[in-house]
Image (cartoon, rainbow, N blue to C red):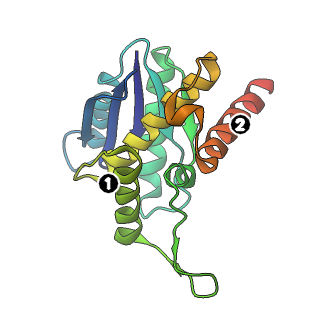
Amino acid sequence: MRFVGIDPGTKTGFVALDENEEVLRAKELTGISDADPKRMVTLIDEVVSHVKPGDVICIEGFPFDTQRAMFAGGLHHGIRNELFKRGFSYYEVAPNAVKKFVNVTGWVGEKGSKKRLTGPAKKKAVMKAVEEHFSFTHKSDNVVDAYIIAQIAKDLWTMESGVECLLNNGYLPIYQAEVLQSILETKKKAKAK
């Protein structure tokens, strides 16, 4: 069994973990070419080629704001469409929930004088938090985000399978539990429709 995290973008992060949380694959995928549609089509094919039957897949949700909205929307839909066509199901996790899972809020400082983290500073804060939480490092912030997403996939599968969670003596930090519960509630609501 593998737990897969996908962070779609022009540089897509892909991570696959085994049941012991060992990294089987940690890669940044880019497709071929700088010109669309070739870049997008080859990137989608590259992402899906790394997925295997039986994988528990979690993919980051659509970004709320992006400089390249058309590309991001097409890529996100394209990956989901290909997964669907091949019979793969997946969990979806909001971009802010990915950061919350490692206790990064996007703010630093004391109450009354907080400063918003943006761009590279926010990415560095997430990378540092992942190293502190899981001892995982990678030069690509996209792969680091995919690693978080793969960890979320593992914990969601554990919760839904009824497998007793032995991590942290059966205890997840409240911020992680809130992320997992939110994803499961969203999935439950979608099934009810």
Q: Distance of mark 1 from mark 2, alpha carbons?
A: 26 Å
Instruction: Describe the element under mark 2 as helix, strand or loop.
Output: helix
Q: Is residue 157 left or right of residue 71?
A: right
User: What percent of the width, then of the height, locates residue 4?
Assistant: 40, 29
Q: Residue furthest bottom?
A: 113
Of 13 and 166, which appears nearest the observer? 166
Quarter of the picture containing the C terminus is: top right
Which residue sits at x=30%, y=23%?
49
Of 136 and 150, which appears nearest the observer? 136
According to the picture, the residue beneath numbered tag 1 turns out to be 141
Q: Is residue 48 something that shows in the picture?
A: yes
Mark 2 Cα-neighbour bin, 10 Å: few <14, some 14–19, many ≥20: some
Three-letter code, disc 1: Asp
Instruction: Describe the element under mark 1 as helix, strand or loop.
Output: helix
The quadrant in which residue 14 appears is top left
User: What percent of the width, then of the height, locates residue 94?
Assistant: 57, 47
User: What percent of the width, then of the height, locates residue 43?
Assistant: 30, 37
Three-letter code, disc 2: Thr
Which residue sits at x=43%, y=34%?
150
Which residue sits at x=37%, y=40%?
147
Q: Is residue 49 left or right of residue 97?
A: left
Q: Residue furthest left?
A: 33
Indicate which disc, 1 or 2, sits on the residue closer to the N terminus. 1
According to the picture, the residue beneath numbered tag 2 turns out to be 186
Mark 1 Cα-neighbour bin, 10 Å: few <14, some 14–19, many ≥20: many
Which residue sits at x=42%, y=48%?
133
